[in-house]
Amino acid sequence: MSADTAYGPNPAPTPAGVLVIDKQPGFTSMDVCAIVRTRLRRGGAPKRIKVGHAGTLDPLATGVLVVLVGRATRAVNALMATEKEYRTKVDLSRRSTSDDLGGELSDVPVACPPDRAAVEAALERFRGVVLQTPPQFSAMKVGGRRAYALAREGEHAPLAARPVEIHEIELRSYEWPLVELHIRCGKGVYIRSLARDLGIALGTGGMLTELRRTRVGTFEILAAKTLDELPQVLVQEHLAPLAE
């Protein structure tokens, strides 16, 4: 029997395609995949139907999560390599052990807050190909273990900086201590690291307070649906085809 057919007396093609999810805060990306898998199984899909995603969003982040089903999961690496866009807010008055609201927060006294021109000048350093060190609370592996697991145990994982590409950073608004940015970037960019490094460049704090992904490749937020907007029973007709 083909891997793309379900078991049973009347085998039917296993569902395959794409769901563009508007992930809400509180869910991990794998939580979303597990919920989608459960709803597909309610619709008659095989118990072990493949469900994956094309790029992790942190639990506190929202926005576009491209979920791949069945044979469409073969495209995961190609989709992860596509451009992404984000809207984010950065607090320059605080730091966090996780570089966002999920960690231990500390206030950073700043005697003379930077003006808009200083922020614009600092952002110039992050355009193009830059070296970026992932956050301590990240999925990067160190000695076979995830960095976030080590961080939770109080260990400081030696994470190496690696080159990433940031195509565009636009300063949307700035009113101390909050910076609002629009970012267009390539694969592997940690927006939390960008917030942290912006603060370092300015001599201030730096941590994310909001992060929303608005695009992954050709998949945009306007086409996305929340889990609440999706049927509780998913079948093939609910999945979009993946363009070859």
Image (spheres, rainbow, N blue to C red):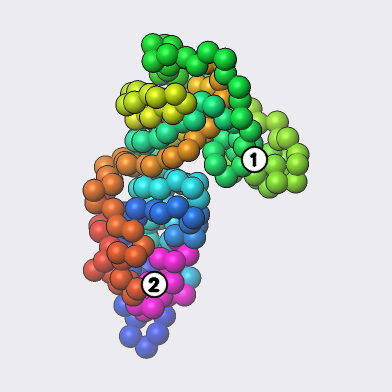
Task: Give the amino acid at mark 1.
Answer: Glu
Question: Which is nearer the N-term, disc 1 or disc 2?
Answer: 2
Question: In the rendering, which numbered label is found on residue 179?
Answer: none
Majority SS type along the magenta span: helix
Is residue 48 in sight in this rendering? Answer: yes
Furthest residue toward front: 111
**What residue does disc 2 label?**
39
> In the figure, is residue 1 to the left or right of 243?
right
In the structure shown, which secondary structural element does the residue marked by tag 1 occupy? loop
> Which residue is found at the position 70% from the left and 46% from the top?
152
Quadrant assignment, res 69: bottom left
| Stretch in magenta | 33-47
Q: Position of residue 37 (x, y in %)?
A: 43, 68
> Which residue is found at the position 54% from the left and 27% from the top?
93
Q: Position of residue 219 (x, y in %)?
A: 28, 46
Instruction: Out of 3 and 213, give the one closest to the viewer.
Output: 213
Task: Give the amino acid at mark 2.
Answer: Arg
> Which residue is found at the position 50% from the left and 16% from the top?
113
**What residue does disc 1 label?**
104
Instruction: Out of 161 and 222, give the one closest to the viewer.
Output: 222
